[in-house]
Structure formats: structure tokens, C-alpha cells
Amino acid sequence: MPITPSDNHWSDFLDHARSLDASDPLAAFRSRFTLPTGLTYLDGNSLGPLSANARESLARVVEEWATLGIRGWTEGRPPWFTFAEELGSRMGRLMGAPAGSVIATGSTTVNLHQFLATLYHPSRERSQILMDSLAFPSDRYAVVSHLALRGQPADRLTIVQAGSDGLLLEEELESRMNFRCAMVVVPSVVYTTGQLLDVRRLCDAAHRCGALIGVDCSHSAGAVPHQLFAWDVDFAFWCGYKYLNGGPGSSAFLYLHPRYHHKSPGLAGWFGSCKERQFEMADEFTAAEGAGGLQIGTPNLLSMAPLWGSLTDIQDAGINTIRAKSLAATDLMMLMLDKAADSQGITIATPREHSRRGGHVAVRHTEAMRICKALSARGIVPDFRPPDTIRLAPAALYNTFSEAASAVVALNDILTTGEFERVSRKLPLVT
Ligand SMILES: Cc1ncc(COP(=O)(O)O)c(C=O)c1O
């Protein structure tokens, strides 16, 4: 029975959540994961948990190291020498990317640096880089440092501000793209609000004005279906440790549109070499064609290995099924938050429309940090993003609807009783 806003008893919501759990096609996937004991883990948009498949693929590479030593480079399963390429192709299939256009490498920030070094060619007429005011800080730091490295004045960076509702407007971004714009760098999902941007539309607009466009997919990979090639994205980059469950510091990925596959990397290194030539140890670098050419040094095998298994979980579940459950869970949370919002001084920062929502729900409150600490004290793991945002991510592979609903009940309780007022104001080192 669908629940409506008039069913306003918390117990009705909790019953409804239980009925959703009973018919959840992904319910069995939860048992694949080791979740922190006694906690309701709603922070998979920061760090996904460990699955049995990820543990197994990591253990396999460790075992190969023990038993094969250096021979693991050719005899590992898959061989370590082509692990990044093979993992990249599996990831590429999930992201709607053709063969050879995705590689597992580096970190999100390093991969953006590589794209800036490879694809940003400022000229007198065209040198502007366009970003938004809600970009993840590291993306902005990377762009600013590139402008400085290239001797470009700092005002070559144009920042498009969010509207008064805290959301970005595609038409506003479009209206700031002009003949001076060389590159646009945007997130697919905004890390604070959880807003999903219309990437296809932004790609069309960037190309109409002659600019390249790159997308930070860290908050959408593994949660939202992508069609990077069909959307005509020029380049994309994303981490492996959020919804992809690759573990802390796991390898990131990058996508390079095939039209640039012949280009030499801006930052060259021997692992970007054409595989057949790499061990010739030639003085001259011969880049591999495709995304692989953008690798720099030796791949971090132990940080890639868990992704081999964790991608299997996502493939088995199917990204469309993951997305459907994620939307149903965030729908439920927002419906419940609406009830809490009336009297508790919170606002929901995440858009209501499915087409504009990523995988988490963002709640704003002036005391967000202390509320997060109070939730943590009750065994619920959200996260806090300054100055006033609480993020709650019900991840489709391992969270239940009941967990999502109970977290909102707890939040309401913390607000009603003023429990957060007894919590210290000290900002933790990691939030
Ligand atoms: C949206 C986004 N972009 C970039 C980064 C930085 O990623 P990394 O530390 O892998 O470079 C993060 C980290 O959380 C992120 O959330």
C-alpha cells in the first residue's frame, strides 16, 4: 500500500518501510557485506563497506603476491600488467563507455590534474574554465593550480553560483558558457546537496560554445546509471571508495572520449606506454591509445584489487535496480523529513524530482554538526559537511528501508528533545 503525506504517524512509516523491505529485490545483497557491528551505516557516499567479493579479490592479489612474486605481473588473474585496463573495461560497461575509454588509475584529484594537463590548451581568445560554486574543493584547487602553472590569471576561472535554494540551475550554467570558455568542469551529483545535474544537456551547451566538458562522477558512479559516451562527455573522473565500495583510498577511474584517444598525455609516465613497447625502456615515450595512455606510474594493485570484487556486486544487482531502490529509499526519507521539518528548523536541501536527485538526502540545520554527533551516539552513521549539512545515504546494496526510516525517526527525536544541545561543538578531524 503506497504511503501518502497524510499518513503521518511515525509507526505508519516504519510499517511501510518494513513492507518495502519484504518486497526488496536487493534484500539478499546485504548479507554479502560486513557492516560495522551495531551501527546503522548511512555513510556509503563517503566510504562504502567491505563485501565478501571485495575481500576475496583483495585476498587473491595478496596471495598472488605471496605465491607468484614478480610473476604476478603476467600470471595473476587477471595479470597485474593489464589489471587497470581490465578493471577499466568492466567499469566502462557500467558507465556507458566504449572499450578502451575507461582506466582504473590514480585518485579523483590526480585524474583531474591529468585531464587539465592533457586537454586544457588556453589561447588568447579562449582560456576560461567554468565551474560551479558547489564543486568539491579539491576539484577547484586542481583547476586553480593549473591556471597558475600555465601563467593564466586567476580570473580565468569563472564560478557559477547556486541559486538562493542552494541548487544549481542548468540554464544558469549554460548562460555563462561563451566563446571565451575553453573548459567546463561540473559534478554529476553535487556532494553536499545530492543534486543530480542534467549532464547531457550541459554537454550539448558546452559543445555549442566550443568548450570541452569534464564531469566529476564521484557521487554518482555505482548509484546512478550513466551514458558517458551517448551524453558526449569529453572526460570524466571518479573515485572508487563511495558507492563502488572499493575501500579506503581505492583506485579512482577516468574516462576519455574516443575522439581524444590519439592525444599524448599532458603528464606522461611509463605506465601510460603502449603495452608492447613499455619494457623496451626506450628514451622516447610511446603512449598507449585510449584512456590507458593517461596512466602515470605503477598501478596500485592492492588498491584496485577490492574493486574487482565490488564491481561484481553491482553487476549482479544491476544499476537500474540499484537506482530504483535508492530513489524509493530517498523518497521515503524525504516524505518523513517533511513531517519533521514542519516544527524542527530543518530544510531538505535535496531536490524532489527523481531526475535531479543522486543517492543521498541532505538536510540543513544550523546545528548540523552537533546533530550528526548525536546521531552517531545513537549508532547511526551520517556525515556532516560544513557549514550546515547532514548527509544520509541509504545505499541500495546493503541498507534496508527500515534503517532509512529509523534514522529519520531518530533525527526527529534528537531535534524534539534537544538532545543535540548536550553535544560538544568541537569539530572532529574527519567528518
Ligand atoms: C565529488 C568529489 N570529488 C573529488 C574528491 C576528491 O577525491 P580524491 O581524494 O580521491 O582525490 C572527493 C572526495 O571525497 C569528492 O567527493
Image: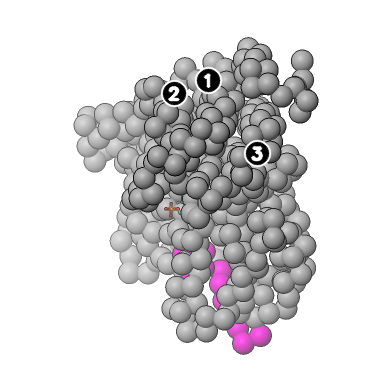
Residue tagged 2: 33
Which of the 4 image quadrants contains residue 416?
A: top right
Instruction: Answer whether labels 2 and 3 touch (C-beta < 8 Å).
Output: no
Q: Which mark is residue 29?
A: 1
Circles 2, 1 touching at the beta carbon (< 8 Å): yes
Amino acid type, mark 2? Phe
Q: CA distance from mark 3 to mark 1?
A: 37 Å
Q: Earlier in the sequence, mark 2 or mark 3?
A: 2
Question: Where does label 3 land, which residue?
Answer: 343
How has the structure been colored for display?
one colour
Dot 1: few (<14), some (14–19), or many (≥20) neighbours within 10 Å? some
Category of crowding for the residue at label 2, using alpha-carbon neighbours closer than 10 angstroms: few (below 14), some (14–19), many (at least 20): many
User: Callout 3: 10 Å neighbours few (<14), some, many (20+)?
Assistant: few
Amino acid, disc 3: Ser
Whether the residues at callouts 3 and 1 have beta carbons within 8 Å, the answer is no
Residue 54: image location, x then y, percent:
41, 29
- Residue sticking out furthest to the bottom: 124
Q: Is mark 1 within 8 Å of ligand 1?
A: no
Residue 86 visible within the image? no
Residue drawn at 31 percent across, 28 percent down? 59
- Whichever of labels 3 and 1 marks the residue nearer the N terminus, that label is 1
Residue positioned 37% across, 22% down in the render? 37
Give the SS element for disc 2: strand
Q: Is residue 195 left or right of residue 116?
A: right
Relative image position of residue 172 (x, y in whole percent): 74, 65
Q: Which residues are magenta?
A: 112-125
Residue 412 appears in view: yes
In the image, taking residue 307 as reference, residue 67 lies left or right, namely left
**Does 85 appear above or below 288?**
above
The kind of residue on which mark 1 rests is Phe
